[in-house]
Image: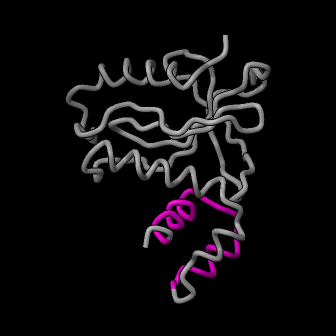
């Protein structure tokens, strides 16, 4: 059975239902799959939850990812650079891979803001590095670091912030 973005939403909504009263939850956020799209035979998008925001890879229907073990780190290449993903099987569900964008989402004022950030991250991920570099302000103190190395979570989020200026 192929995993879908809606399956992930359903799984994480069940988990969220068991988390009442847990510190660090943002009551302004709900579980939502944002911008999932085909990519190299898989699906990639962002999953927002009241306690995190992750970039997520879902295996395509032809790919079962049997050889991946839970919590194994794997690097995937995107037009903007490489990202490290960790495998996950929440509640024993089918495997998917996640790269943490925000380990805490307490600072998001509402779902719309979280969704907008998720979409900016996805757009930046699929923008070739050369295009991203041209949008970086030459006077930005982090410019050299952004240009010199592959994309990391922090770099990706920083690019989103720089592009929004």
Residue 143 locus on image (x, y percent): 58, 80
Vertical arrangement, residue 141 with respect to residue 154, above or below: below
Q: In what quadrant of the picture does the C terminus appear?
A: bottom left
In this rendering, would 15 be left or right of 100?
Answer: left
Foreground residue, 70 or 57?
57
- Residue 159 % position (x, y): 54, 66
Point out the residue furthest to the left here. 21
Please determine whether, in this image, residue 132 is positioned above or below residue 21: below
Dominant secondary structure of the residues highlighted in magenta in the image: helix
Q: Is residue 55 left or right of residue 83?
A: left
Q: Residue at x 22, y 37 (%)?
A: 27
Give residue 63's quadrant in the image: top right
Q: Residue at x 58, y 75 (%)?
A: 135
Which corner quadrant of the image does residue 19 belong to?
A: top left
For this orientation, the residue located farthest to the top is 1
Residue 72: x, y in percent? 67, 36
Query: What residue is rendered at 44% in x and 18% in y?
Result: 10
Q: Residue at x 79, y 20 (%)?
A: 62
83, above or below 72, in the image: below
Magenta run includes residue 36: no
The segment highlighted magenta reads 140-162
**Residue 160 magenta:** yes
Measuring from the top left, give residue 22's x and y in whole percent. Answer: 25, 32
Q: Quadrant of the N terminus?
A: top right
């Amino acid at each position: 059975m192929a995993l879908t973005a809606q399956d992930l939403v359903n799984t994480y909504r069940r988990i969220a239902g068991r988390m009442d009263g847990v510190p660090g939850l943002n009551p302004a956020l709900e579980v939502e799959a944002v911008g999932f799209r085909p990519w190299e035979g898989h699906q990639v998008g962002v999953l927002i939850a009241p306690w995190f925001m992750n970039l997520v890879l879902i295996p395509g229907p032809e790919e079962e990812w049997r050889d991946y073990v839970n919590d194994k780190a794997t690097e995937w290449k995107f037009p903007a650079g490489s990202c490290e993903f960790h495998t996950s099987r929440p509640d024993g569900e089918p495997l998917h891979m996640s790269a943490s964008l925000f380990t805490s989402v307490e600072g998001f004022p509402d779902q719309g803001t979280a969704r907008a950030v998720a979409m900016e991250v996805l757009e930046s991920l699929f923008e070739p590095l050369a295009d991203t570099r041209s949008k970086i302000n030459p006077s930005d103190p982090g410019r050299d670091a952004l240009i010199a190395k592959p994309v990391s979570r922090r770099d990706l989020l920083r690019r989103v912030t720089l592009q929004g200026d």
